[in-house]
Image (tube, rainbow, N blue to C red):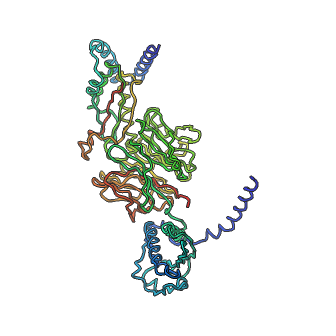
Amino acid sequence: MKKKITMMGILVVAVFSMTLFLGCAEKKAVVAEGTAQEQPSAAQDAATLSAAAAQEALNDINFDFDRSNIGPAARGIMKANADILLKNRNFNIIVEGHCDERGTSEYNMALGERRAQEAKKYLINLGVDGARMKTISYGEERALDSRSNEEAWAKNRRAHFLIVQ
Amino acid sequence: MKQLSKIALLTLTIFSCLILPNQASAKIYIDIDSPSFQQFPIAICDLNNISSGALQSTNIGVTLADEIKKYLSITGIFNILNKNSFLEKMEPGNPDIIEKVYFPDWSLIGADYLLRGNILQKGKQIIVDNRLFDVIRNELIMSKKYTSSSGNQKELAKNIASDILLALTGDEGEFNTKIAFISKSNNSSDIYTIDYDGSNQTKITNHQSLIMSPRWSPDNKYLAFTSFKEGAPKVFIKNLQTGAEKKVSAHEGLNLCGSFSPDGKYLLLTLSKEGIEDIYSLNVETMRLNRLTHSYSIDVSPAWSSDGRQIAFVSNRSGSPQIYVMDADGNNVRRLTYEGNYNTSPSWSPRGNRIAYEGRVYGRYQIFSIDTEGNNLIQLTFDNADNESPSWSPSGRQIAYTSKTASRSRLCIMNANGLNIRILNEKSNPSVMPVWSSRFKK
């Protein structure tokens, strides 16, 4: 019963996304390509990853200063991340949004959430079930690199994909 | 019973009507809001010890005067004259000298105002009898007697300084206020409070987690804030008397604390439960939530106007974070700031006419203030540091903020015109998000 409902949910989301992106030919193609190819290949690659291996395989994406859009460099990473999530449906993820140390902590808390939301939405567009994903913002409070320079800031402006069982 | 209180109210109203005209005409001696405001020179004499016996030789008159000077100087509006420059010779121990002022001796050294007083120590009691003079006009401004227990000298000095401020400016100042702020260490942060004079630093929370955005309730009885102690950011309200904490907002995604309405009934929040960071108003009694903004952009950091009719907030709807103002029901949104491409952290002056905020200039963050029509922009800080999170004092005369460089973090207070910066504390780990309380009842 539960499964049926989930399946229906996925179908509804899929149909909904299709209608949503009807106006955007390029994105529609990505979605169609993603869902059409991934499912059979998931069946072929029966070897699903362990949670630890999947965590290892998921990569962060980075953002420009004060921006939350998924840039060209991040799109390839997001496609690979989506593939992993589509092939490994036995775990959920938390999408973490982070900012660099510059600017206002409070605004950065909202900006981090926006980044997490944008990343989540992008994964949904690539076919990943939204119900598997939660978002959390850490704003500028959890830097990967504590230095104060361009290199560190670029690394710290990120979305991280954390696997939860 | 109800009738009784009605009669009392009526009596009070009539009485106020009788005295109000007098008050309205009462002279405000120092207009510190004038653009040409300069610090006012005041001479504080050591209090004249008129105690009998051995108590006459104590230096309590000197130490109390020093305390009064300390409190007056932290208001940022007085220039306390050095007592070594005083010319008039006074006969110590003679109670009459406080009334007999030779004004030319005081105007000659540049004093505009003069405080003299007698102090009498009787057992554990201290009785102070003060006179405040206007040196230019050769007249008495205030005469007041204080009785206090001898252990409470600091409180006594605070009250005297507060009365001087009230007599000269029409406002009692900020002596009975605190500033709450976040102190960060490693991966956790907690709320602390500190008194206006920089003393009495107290740890308020102990969540071993990330805490941010503290906000006082208007009666100072509660602090609302966002804490990650349960993993995700949720909003709590802490009762400062009992220490009890109540979780008031735990929606999926972001729950970021905004500010209390002036009547204390509503708490503004930033929530992302609909997938977009928007501003909501939470009725803290009924827990009813009302969405105020609906833009497809970040809306954050809401700050109520002192009359409760409007809300300032940050939005990036134009592509970069800017300060906006809307009516309290979410209507009539208008953009306030156009200078620069990063303006955040609005704080609405209790006087109602200005909004302070931080803006990015040449890669640094500086404090600005602007009037509520978006005109008369003033930059208040200029040093080579990140100056952030302005919060007005209850009188609207001073602004608390943080000032950070690579090596140190300061909690500071400056006058509303940017002058007279005073450092409340300095640490190596960051102090952030200072918020000024209202006045605590004496």
Residue B51 seen in this snapshot: yes
Does B363 appear above or below B92? above
Residue B63's x, y, as percent? 44, 74
Question: On the rendered structure, is B437 left or right of A144?
Answer: right
- Residue at the image position 42 percent from the left and 54 percent from the top: B390
- Residue at the image position 44 percent from the left and 18 percent from the top: A9
Does B425 appear above or below B160? above
Residue B341 seen in this snapshot: no
Most foreground residue, B89 or B419: B89
Residue A12's x, y, as percent? 44, 18
Does B113 appear above or below A102? below
- Residue at the image position 45 percent from the left and 59 percent from the top: B195
Q: Quadrant of the C terminus of chain B?
A: bottom right
Residue B91's x, y, as percent? 49, 87
Residue B3's x, y, as percent? 76, 54
**Quarter holding residue A39:** top left
- Residue at the image position 49 percent from the left and 56 percent from the top: B349
**Quarter holding residue B320:** top left
Looking at the image, how many numbered discs can be counted on the residues?
0
Question: On the rendered structure, is B48 left or right of A30?
Answer: right
Most foreground residue, B386 or B309: B386
